[in-house]
Amino acid sequence: HFDKDKNKTAAPTPTPTPEDVTTPALELKPRKLIDFRNKVYVAPLTTVGNLPFRRITKLFGADITCGEMALAENILKGKPSEWALLKRHSSEDVFGIQLASGFADQFTRCAELLEGEHVECDFVDCNLGCPIDLVCEKGAGASLMLREKRLKE
């Protein structure tokens, strides 16, 4: 209704080419293959697996470390306490971060943000096992195991 000339026809929408469909929106970077076999892996431990604890585990022979669970929602909101969970110490040669979210789009936006902020990690662990009510009520953690369709997103 904003057009004064009612005789104009809308320009046809171009048909996407195979290149448009298969070309990713973000630049793909080479992936580093991590061999977990025969390695001591310090799994993410909420409220315990902080950076000082992980430094101690490295002194005692841990090969792979992972930060505490961070909520993707809080990362996207810019909460400093959540961003602190993503910090890596120089002694952590193979380091991962664990994210919890109940929504694929939050995982995606968070991953894009972390990439843009140059967060140094070797892998991202998507939390599917946290039984804490606060996490499960948001559709994340262990509650994702009950939502096969959402998990496949």
Image (cartoon, helix red, strand yellow):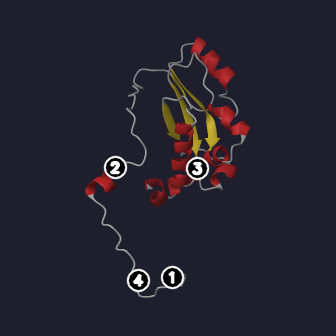
Q: Earlier in the sequence, mark 2 or mark 3?
A: 2
Q: Which residue is pictured at 45% across the width and 60% down the height? A: 149
Q: Nearer the viewer, residue 116 or 92?
A: 116
Q: Earlier in the sequence, mark 1 or mark 2?
A: 1
Q: Which residue lies under the disc numbered 4?
A: 8
Q: Nearer the viewer, residue 84 or 63?
A: 84
Residue 27 to residue 8: above or below:
above
Q: 10 Å neighbourhood of mark 1: few (<14), some, or many (≥20)?
A: few
Three-letter amino acid code at the position of disc 1: Asp
Q: Is residue 119 left or right of residue 52?
A: left
Three-letter amino acid code at the position of disc 2: Thr
Q: Is residue 63 left or right of residue 57?
A: left
Task: Look at the numbered discs 4 and 3 and tell me whether their residues touch, using CB distance below 8 Å.
Answer: no
Nearer to us: label 2 or label 4: 4
Q: CA distance from mark 2 to mark 3?
A: 27 Å
Q: 10 Å neighbourhood of mark 2: few (<14), some, or many (≥20)?
A: few
Q: Secondary structure at mark 2?
A: loop
Q: Which residue lies under the disc numbered 2?
A: 23
The percent position of residue 66, horizontal first and vertical second, equals 56, 29
Q: Is residue 80 left or right of residue 34?
A: right
Q: 10 Å neighbourhood of mark 4: few (<14), some, or many (≥20)?
A: few
Q: 10 Å neighbourhood of mark 3: few (<14), some, or many (≥20)?
A: many
Q: Secondary structure at mark 4?
A: loop
Q: Secondary structure at mark 1?
A: loop
Q: Which residue is pictured at 48% across the width and 29% down the height? A: 122
Nearer to us: label 1 or label 3: 1
Nearer to us: label 1 or label 2: 1
Task: Look at the numbered discs 1 and 4 and tell me whether their residues touch, using CB distance below 8 Å.
Answer: yes
Q: Earlier in the sequence, mark 1 or mark 4?
A: 1
Q: CA distance from mark 1 to mark 4?
A: 8 Å
Q: Which residue lies under the disc numbered 1?
A: 3
